[in-house]
């Protein structure tokens, strides 16, 4: 049985996606469990985050939900500042290193979703060559 080049590429992209997603989720859990108190202390005046703060005690999924809210505020602060969901002072005083990590993680997550969607399209429309 011979494997075509397209199948090899599809397999490599799929494995890279799986590895990237695993690392992505690991980094999210690491931030959620080690830096959450620091992030919440810096966002005390942000209603968009504080209304979700009780989810902190909701286990791993609650922590990820809260981290997603914080990542949203850090990635698109204008939206939250305009509707009063964030405090400009809190965003200005937020640690730059963590903010950068959150923004990179946010866009990495969207990139992984895009790769997953492309893999789905390849399978759905049978774009991998049959042997």
Image (spheres, helix red, strand yellow):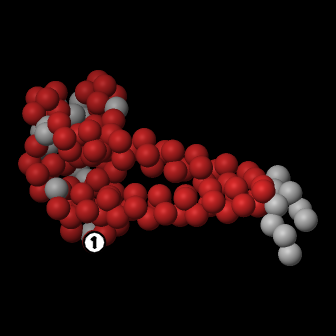
Q: Is residue 120 above or below residue 73?
A: below
The residue at the far front in this view is: 2
Mark 1 Cα-neighbour bin, 10 Å: few <14, some 14–19, many ≥20: few
Q: Is residue 95 above or below residue 89?
A: below
Total numbered labels placed on residues in the image: 1
Q: Give the secondary structure at mark 1.
A: helix
The residue at the far right in this view is: 131
Q: Position of residue 36 (x, y in %)?
A: 17, 56
Q: Position of residue 99 (x, y in %)?
A: 23, 40
Q: Position of residue 34 (x, y in %)?
A: 17, 61
Image quarter hosting the C terminus: bottom right
List the residue tagged with mark 1.
Answer: 59
Residue drawn 89% across the image and 62% down it: 130
Residue drawn 28% across the image and 71% down it: 59
- Residue 117 in sight from this viewpoint: yes
Q: Is residue 39 above or below residue 76?
A: below
Image quarter hosting the N terminus: bottom right
The residue at the far bottom in this view is: 1
Left or right: 122 with respect to 126?
A: left
């Amino acid at each position: 049985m011979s494997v075509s080049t397209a199948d090899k590429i599809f397999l490599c992209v799929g494995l890279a996606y799986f590895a990237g997603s695993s690392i992505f989720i690991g980094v999210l859990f690491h931030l959620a469990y080690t830096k959450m108190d620091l992030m919440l202390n810096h966002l005390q005046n942000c209603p968009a985050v504080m209304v979700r703060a009780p989810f902190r005690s909701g286990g791993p999924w609650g922590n990820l939900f809260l981290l997603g809210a914080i990542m949203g505020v850090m990635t698109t602060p204008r939206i939250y500042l305009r509707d009063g969901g964030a405090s400009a002072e809190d965003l200005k005083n937020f640690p730059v290193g963590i903010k950068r990590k959150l923004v990179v993680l946010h866009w990495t997550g969207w990139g992984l979703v895009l790769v997953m969607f492309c893999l789905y399209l390849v399978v759905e429309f049978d774009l991998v060559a049959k042997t």
